[in-house]
Image: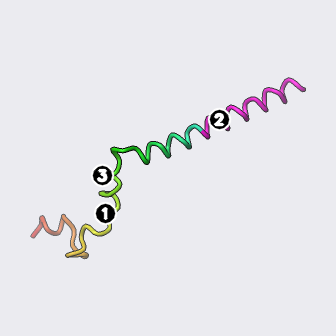
């Protein structure tokens, strides 16, 4: 019974380390130097059709 408990604790510790590594990796990936342009373009998506808020590209192509 003690062997199973020891293996369970080791698996928990390795999973915690793996999740922490993934978390730090995601943060580093988000703040990498080349991602600034992507983030800025994504941030302005709601304001792209500010001149004609009700129109879409399909309506413009049909007329």
- The answer to which quarter of the image holds residue 22 is top right
The N terminus: image quadrant: top right
Task: Using the image, determine if residue 43 lies above or below residue 52.
Answer: above
State which tag comes first along the sequence, 3 or 2: 2
Q: Which residues are magenta?
A: 1-20
Q: Main secondary structure of the magenta part?
A: helix
Tell me the element at label 2. helix
Going by the image, does 56 lie left or right of 15?
A: left
The chosen color scheme is rainbow
| Mark 2 surroundings: few (<14), some (14-19) or many (≥20) residues within 10 A | few
| Mark 1 surroundings: few (<14), some (14-19) or many (≥20) residues within 10 A | few
Q: Position of residue 16 (x, y in %)?
A: 67, 38
Identify the residue under disc 2: 17
Tell me the element at label 1. helix
Identify the residue under disc 3: 37
Task: Using the image, determine if residue 35 lies above or below residue 57.
Answer: above
Q: Are marks 1 and 3 in contact (CB under 8 Å)?
A: no
Q: CA distance from mark 3 to mark 2?
A: 32 Å
| Residue at point 12%, 64% (across, down) | 61
| Residue at point 24%, 70% (across, down) | 49
The C terminus: image quadrant: bottom left
State which tag comes first along the sequence, 1 or 3: 3
State which tag comes first along the sequence, 1 or 2: 2
Q: CA distance from mark 1 to mark 2?
A: 36 Å
- The answer to which quarter of the image holds residue 5 is top right
What is the number of the mark on residue 45?
Answer: 1
Q: Is residue 2 magenta?
A: yes
Q: Is residue 7 magenta?
A: yes
Q: Outermost residue toward the top?
A: 3
Q: Nearer the viewer, mark 1 or mark 2?
A: 2
Tell me the element at label 3. helix
| Residue at point 30%, 52% (across, down) | 37
């Amino acid at each position: 019974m003690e062997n199973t408990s020891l293996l369970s604790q080791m698996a928990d510790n390795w999973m915690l380390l793996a999740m922490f590594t993934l978390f730090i990796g995601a943060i580093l990936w988000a703040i990498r130097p080349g991602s600034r342009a992507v983030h800025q373009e994504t941030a302005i998506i709601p304001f792209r059709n500010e001149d004609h808020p009700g129109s879409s590209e399909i309506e413009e192509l049909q007329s």
